[in-house]
Image (cartoon, coloured by chain):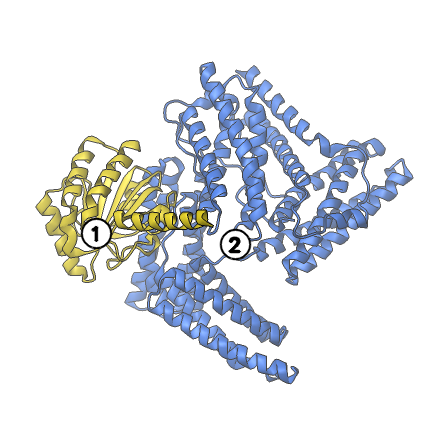
Amino acid sequence: MNGQWTAIVTGVLFLVFMGLVDGVSSAQDGSGGLAVDAALGPFECVKCGGAKSDGVEVGEPVCYRSRNSSRPQVIIFAHQLEQLSLLDELAKSLDARMSSASSLRVFVNVLGADLAATKKKAGEWSEKLGLQQVAVVVPLEHTQGPEAYQLDKDALVTVIVAKRSRVVASRAVRTAADIKSVSESLSKDLDSL
Amino acid sequence: MLLASMLYRQRVLVTALLVSIPLLETGFRVPTASAQGQNNSPRTSPNSQLLDGLFRDILSTQMERTRQRDEARNQSTGYAPASPFDVGSPRGVPESGVFSRPPSTLPTSVPRERDLSRGYYPDSGSLRSLQAAMDGFAQQMGYLRSLLQARANTVLGLRPLLTDVMRIKASADNLSALGHTATSYSDIYRDYLDLDMHWRNLSYQLRDLNGLDSATQRTVRQLDAYSDQIVDLFRVEPQFDRQGMLDQMTMARSYLTTLLDDVRYEIPRTPQRDAVINEGLRLQEQIRREGDFVRTARYDEIVPRYTEFVGSWRRFSGKLLSYKNARLNRNISQIRKCGEAVYHLLWIPASLDRNYLAVMASSYNEEIQQWLVDIPLASVARLNPSQQQQALAASKELDQLTRQFHEAVRSQTLIVSLAEQFRGVRRSRDRLQNVLGPDDTNEGDNRRLRIDAYDGELRDLLDVPEALDLSQAMQLASAIEGLADTFKQDVHRYGPYYQNGTFRNQAYQVVDTFFRQAQQMNSAVASGVPLDQLQTYGNSMLTTWNSVMRMVAATSNNGLDTSRFQRLDRTRQDLAPLIAELATMLTI
């Protein structure tokens, strides 16, 4: 009987501990959006900046997911316009990485309820960072992102890594402090692609 | 090179014959009622060996046909061999499944480094790796088959995929056996590329299912890994179905022509209408160009171009949907299906077209509301008071649920919730229909067909699969009955040529039984009897089919000359894939 209680208490403590230390949720636990191995569907967006030489004009509708096709790609969703600066370092480091890794593609989807304001902010942000390789876009489903991606609406940021049109990893970040650990995990994911 | 090719063909035939020997024993008998009864439990797994044997038999037949076709083609054009999966449709039999279509004339791959079909002799280490990967693939495929069969009743949408699972397993077993004797990649190169293409399509569809357990998902991943390993060894890209895409694009173009004709007839002439027609003509040209592009382009080039086309199509169809014209909507529906099929062949889930969903939900709502208003008093009057109460409650419920669903679609509710609501509407409609019974009037029949059509569209859009693809089952059952009739007549007509009276009687008995069972199955599928009953009928038919095959094999030893035997055997070959597909669909 004592053994059973010990096991239950240990289990509860473990879950509490995991909840406290881990604000990052991954697809494996079902809260980070698409599951690992899920196929990525297309979604249309409007380019707002970045990726200076990819042949897509700012303001042009485009499906970057399809343009990137089966190549390794990172799809980032910034769920809250006012928290966009959280992604400054990550976007810059990915931009630098893309310059050396020719097959990698990255695009940041800025989400917001007001379409015009979201586009404006997204454009300004990409200009501020001087992104040369990473594209910055606003999806047509601009409030909560493409439905098929099952994004967590409470997240600040969602980062999806994909290869051969399938999800390799998907992480939702719920607190500002967790962006660092997500960046580290992303770096490991990209190294292993 | 020529010698290597001949040796390979011989090996293919020998392997095919070896695997089909158990089916060609000369003894046969009509299955007794008790023997059939042993297989009749709908919950038990099918006689897997019997089904496996049937698929191996089909494979060997296809390989033989392919060999004959290749020989003819090589004599005239010197063209490379086609796929053993490619098989023409039997006489008077509907096409079924992705494996059944005319041979592809398109290249199956874009080799990364060299054309291996012309001969590439790797080091023995690579060849051993290839053999090991193929063995692993075949073994895992067998495991996957068992896992999926066990889950066919619990995972919605799985049942229609089982036929492909069985076919791929049969082909993988065959290639694994051939791999052990191969001395060159070129021996198995083309066959494997076909297998890879079919596996990747199946893998995509399996991953798309909801409710697959972790063991099955692991097995699918393992098979993907083997598949990736093998294409890497062959130094080619993962295979995708160019011919399938081209077929779908050709169909879409043809539907677009009809759609534009209908726009001319149905919509009064205005500058806006003319602008719409011009836009449609541009799309028609665009899809023709996409079709040309698909023939040779790489996967990564096709995906973005095709998505661009789909975007243009959706903007165009949105304009047409606003006319709310049923005739136009039918064509739009067909083109949409072709478009989704292309995406599936590219292993990409198509995004939901909310405009189209809204129109379908609105039409469905209107038809249901009209049905509720028009329910004939006579059909209610013949119910007893308790049933009348039930009918009234069911009508109210259906009315309410349909309106709620329609409203939810208009307010952009999430797809998951919409799918759940739609399931509720369907259950409610079934309840009402069960209480009211069938409406045999013409008007009732037409209304049911219209509601069923919208129901099918909504199921497709919201990804709500049926337990059984009834229309496919009906086509198969009907084709089997037709061929079983031909078969029975042939066996009776050849009666005077059988030397042995006992054999003659047994032959008559077995084909008569088979024909009767085929009739029973066709009628049962058409009248929508429950799945467990269909499984029982299917079990009996499969057991009898085993006897039919043995009987055909024995006819040549019992006095039938070669041409008559070949005629019977040809009908047997035509029937085999249909029975295999129906039996697998029912997962007897």
The answer to whether any part of residue B323 appears in the image is no
Element assignment for label 1: loop
Between residues A4 and B305, which one lies in front from this camera angle? A4
Residue that carries the numbered disc 1 in the rendered image: A175
Q: Which residue is mark 2?
A: B156
Q: Is residue A100 above or below residue B416?
A: above
Q: Quadrant of residue B352?
A: bottom left
Judging by colour alone, the chain drawn in yellow in this rendered image is A
Position of the C terminus of chain A by quadrant = top left
Disc 2 secondary structure class: loop
- Percent x, y of residue B442: 60, 74
Residue B142 seen anywhere in this rendered image of the structure: yes
Q: Residue furthest left?
A: A128
Q: Nearer the viewer, residue B565 or B541?
A: B541
| Percent x, y of residue B156 | 52, 54
Above or below — where is B160 with respect to B328? Answer: above
Crowding at dot 1, Cα within 10 Å, few <14 / some 14-19 / many 20+, comes out as some
Residue positioned 70% across, 55% down in the render: B521
In this rendering, position of residue A9 left or right of residue B45 = left
Residue A157: image location, x then y, percent: 23, 50
How many marks are shown on the rendered structure?
A: 2
Tell me the amino acid under the disc marked 2: Leu
Q: Are marks 2 and 1 on the same chain?
A: no
Quadrant hosting residue A105: top left
Q: Chain of mark 2?
A: B
For marks 2 and 1, give the CA distance. 38 Å
Q: Nearer the viewer, residue B85 or B292?
A: B85
To which chain does the residue with label 1 belong?
A
At which x and y percent is residue B103? 53, 37
| Picture colour for chain B | blue
